[in-house]
Amino acid sequence: MTVAGGRKAGAPTGAPTGALDVRPAPVLELTYAYFRLADLDGRQTPLPWLRELRDHPPRWLSASMARRGEELGYEALLIACACGYEADETPDRFLADFPALPPAVVGEFAAAFVQPEGTEGDELVSERSTAIRAALERLAEPAAARQLALTLRWLWEHLRPAWEGGGRSATEAAARALQTATGSGGDLLASLPVHHFVQLEDSVNAIRAQAGRGHTLVVPLYFALRGGFRFRVRDQLVIGYGARTEDVYEQQREEVVALAGRLKAFSDPTRLLLLFHVSRLSRFPLTVGDLAKQLGVSQPTASGHLRLLRELGLVTVVRRGNRSYYRLEREAVRPLLDELERTLLPPTADRRR
């Protein structure tokens, strides 16, 4: 088995040969999903297939995760493209061939991954060439290759129902839409999702540079959301993006806007000081007059801010006779702070390779 020209002997011949190829790619779906397995250590994931593995881990997963510290995670993704499996309609041939592929890729590492000096779009290799080659060399050990092939096969068994039940059709529709939008000689950048890393400056430069130089493969990914990958292999720029990127962005945007409304309590110093005093003096019954005096503001000013805090559910009123006292709702504050942390400090950031 040899690797030559970015296309393995016996690879499908029905793939488009023009400068731009847009297609679903189940082999790249699988290898990207394997990369995302590292996110199992996080406290949350919006990916249903990954959440299911985290909440109900099968036996094969623990052995796989134990080896992740020795891997970059995307070796299989690079191998799939270096050996020309991206056009396969199923991962079956790739999984059967995989144990023999890493040594062939190591033997042709320079031809497959080392780009001419100054080439745009190869930052993954230019910055991490030594680490990538070392990872591929470790994987060239027969036992390591066989074990990863087995893990990939188990992972595909987990993913296949979702792929066959809607993933294939969703990515086919996304590919058709992108092909229609780009048309003949159309602008790929104008047609890719606006809220995806492929629209960031370094990706834009790479895509523009590739347009006049070689082949570009664009893969809508079903098992990604706002993540994906971008790298060069041989003369090809490979881009993977979440097919539902814009839908996910709109949902996340709505959630952040709603969170901003709930964070009004913290956006004004007087309101935050009111929460501070209600919290720190929780052993004492505090009237609006007490709080106004503590802050050095008028009672109507304190009352207006407390009204908003009540509407946000952060303080409650306890009535004793004809007096009203304010109490902090700790069980409302903690989830709000947790949500802010999840929004700004996610356990694992969206990754791209």
Image: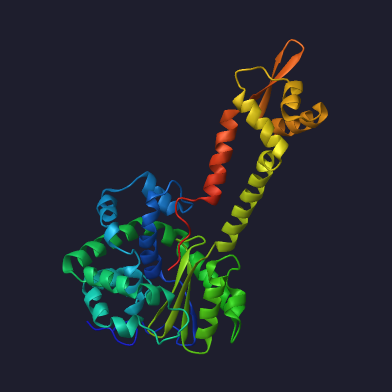
The vertical placement of 98 against 51, above or below, is below
Identify the residue at the far top of this view. 321
Q: Residue 192 versus residue 69: which sits nearer the camera?
A: 69
Residue found at x 29% / y 57%: 69
Residue found at x 57% / y 79%: 188
Task: Evaluate whether residue 91 shows in this view.
Answer: no
Identify the residue at the far bottom of this view. 212
Going by the image, does 231 lie left or right of 96?
right
Q: Examine the image and state in which quarter residue 11 appears.
A: bottom left
Look at the image and tell me in which quarter the N terminus lies: bottom left
Residue found at x 39% / y 77%: 126
Going by the image, does 278 lie left or right of 171?
right
Q: Residue 89 versus residue 208: which sits nearer the camera?
A: 208
Q: Examine the image and state in which quarter residue 56 appears.
A: top left
The colour style of the image is rainbow
Residue 147 in the image: state x and y as whole percent.
Answer: 22, 62
Residue found at x 56% / y 78%: 179
Look at the image and tell me in which quarter the C terminus lies: bottom left
Residue 138 in the image: state x and y as whole percent.
Answer: 22, 68
The vertical placement of 122 against 287, above or below, is below
Task: Say how many tags the image has.
Answer: 0
Q: Residue 169 versus residue 175: which sits nearer the camera?
A: 175
Q: Examine the image and state in which quarter residue 184 appears.
A: bottom right
Going by the image, does 112 lie left or right of 182?
left
Residue 173 in the image: state x and y as whole percent.
Answer: 54, 69
Task: Evaluate whether residue 289 shows in this view.
Answer: yes
Residue 201 in the image: state x and y as whole percent.
Answer: 56, 74
